[in-house]
Image (tube, rainbow, N blue to C red):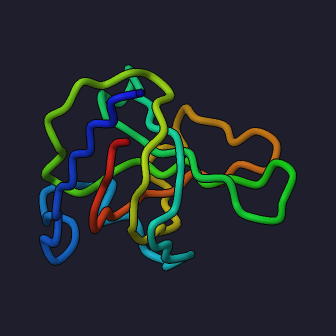
């Protein structure tokens, strides 16, 4: 039987910190998800994690949500690992200097309420 390790981290911090410019630039609320599934990645250029969340009922539409919550859980990270999460996506211009959205991708910031790693 496959051993499942679940790490639940409550990250109810009341939003992004004032010192985090990406969070400050996340101005327009886009969507809120509860217990959604996505894949966790790390961006070497910006030295931050992001979650790719595919919109239900679409072929290629997805949010690339750069995590702006200050506290991040400590667990063994594997590129592209599946995570379950709840949070809010906000439109941002913080990553427009180099990143180009492809296909149905929207580059956003993501304020996480909780993250579960199966």
What residue is rendered at 41% in x and 27% in y?
A: 1
Left or right: 19 as drawn, with respect to 106? left
The image quadrant of residue 99 is top right
Q: Position of residue 30 (x, y in %)?
A: 56, 75
Q: Where is residue 102 in the image (x, y as percent from the top left)?
A: 76, 39
What residue is rendered at 56% in x and 48% in y?
A: 64
What residue is rendered at 55% in x and 32% in y?
A: 98
Which of the image's four quarters has the C terminus?
top left
What residue is rendered at 12% in x and 71% in y?
A: 13
The image quadrant of residue 115 is bottom left
What is the number of callouts on the image? 0
Q: Position of residue 48 (x, y in %)?
A: 31, 35
Looking at the image, the residue that sits furthest to the right is: 59
Looking at the image, the residue that sits furthest to the front is: 1
Is residue 56 positioned above or below 63 on the image? Answer: below
Left or right: 18 as drawn, with respect to 32? left
Is residue 45 positioned above or below 110 on the image? Answer: above
Is residue 36 positioned above or below 38 on the image? Answer: below
Left or right: 34 as drawn, with respect to 13? right
């Amino acid at each position: 039987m496959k051993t499942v390790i679940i790490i639940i981290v409550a990250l109810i911090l009341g939003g992004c910190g004032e010192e985090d410019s990406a969070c400050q630039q996340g101005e327009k609320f886009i969507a809120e998800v509860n217990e959604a599934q996505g894949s966790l990645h790390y961006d070497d250029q910006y030295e931050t994690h992001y979650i790719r969340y595919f919109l239900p009922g679409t072929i290629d539409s997805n949010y690339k949500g750069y995590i702006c919550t200050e506290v991040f859980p400590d667990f063994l990270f594997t590129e592209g690992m599946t995570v379950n999460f709840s949070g809010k996506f906000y439109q941002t211009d913080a990553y427009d200097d180099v990143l180009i959205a492809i296909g149905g991708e929207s580059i956003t910031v993501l304020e996480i309420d909780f993250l579960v790693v199966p």
